[in-house]
Image: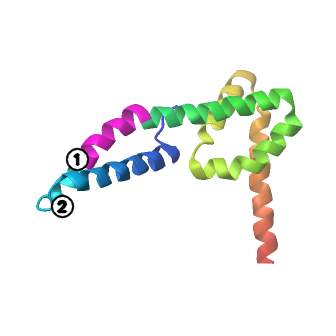
Amino acid sequence: MNYTSTVLSVLFAVWFASIIEHWSKKWITSVVQMFLVPVVTMLITLPIAFIVIGPVMTWVGDAIGAVMSGIYHFSPIVAGLFLGGLWQVLVIFGVHRGIVDVTTADLAALGYDPILGMTCMVCYAQIGVVLAIIK
């Protein structure tokens, strides 16, 4: 899995860039700040984001997928409650990709995946809530 579809890596990279920007504004003279602050910020942030932040956030997504798979093997009911409660939050931050990778591997190896059904139920429940509000 690559980290191009996760939001967490972008959020942490922007947070890191803001720290670098504040630091560089203190040290760069005001005459050239308009030009040098963005350049210094990007020169420091981009390598750190690609080398450190992206892979770490990918690992976080993979770890969440492994934890979810372990919870499912322990108790499918608990996994359904846990996944149902957190799925939309995971999607918002793009961390759901770790779980989607596990489901894709299960579909390829076994031909079925029960975790995928649990995630679909969350979406159907959300559709039901929207339709109830519209009525």
Disc 1 residue type (three-letter) = Val
Tell me where the magenta segment starts and ends, as one range: 40-52
As displayed, is residue 22 above or below residue 102?
below
Disc 2 residue type (three-letter) = Met
* Image quarter of residue 64: top right
Residue 6, x across and y down, in percent: 52, 44
Residue 69, x across and y down, in percent: 74, 30
Residue situated in front as seen by the camera: 38 or 91: 38
**Residue at numbered disc 1:** 40
Q: Classify residue 125 as left or right of residue 101.
A: right
Residue 88, x across and y down, in percent: 68, 52
Q: What residue is drawn where x is 55% and y is 31%?
A: 59
**Residue at numbered disc 2:** 34
Q: Classify residue 95 as left or right of residue 73.
A: left
In reply to whether residue 80 is colored magenta, the answer given is: no
Q: What residue is drawn where x is 39% and y is 46%?
A: 16
Residue 63, x across and y down, in percent: 63, 31
As displayed, is residue 124 above or below residue 46?
below
Secondary-structure class at tag 1: helix
Q: What residue is drawn where x is 76% and y is 62%?
A: 127
Q: CA distance from mark 1 to mark 2?
A: 11 Å
Residue situated in front as seen by the camera: 32 or 73: 32
Q: Earlier in the sequence, mark 1 or mark 2?
A: 2
In reply to whether residue 48 is colored magenta, the answer given is: yes
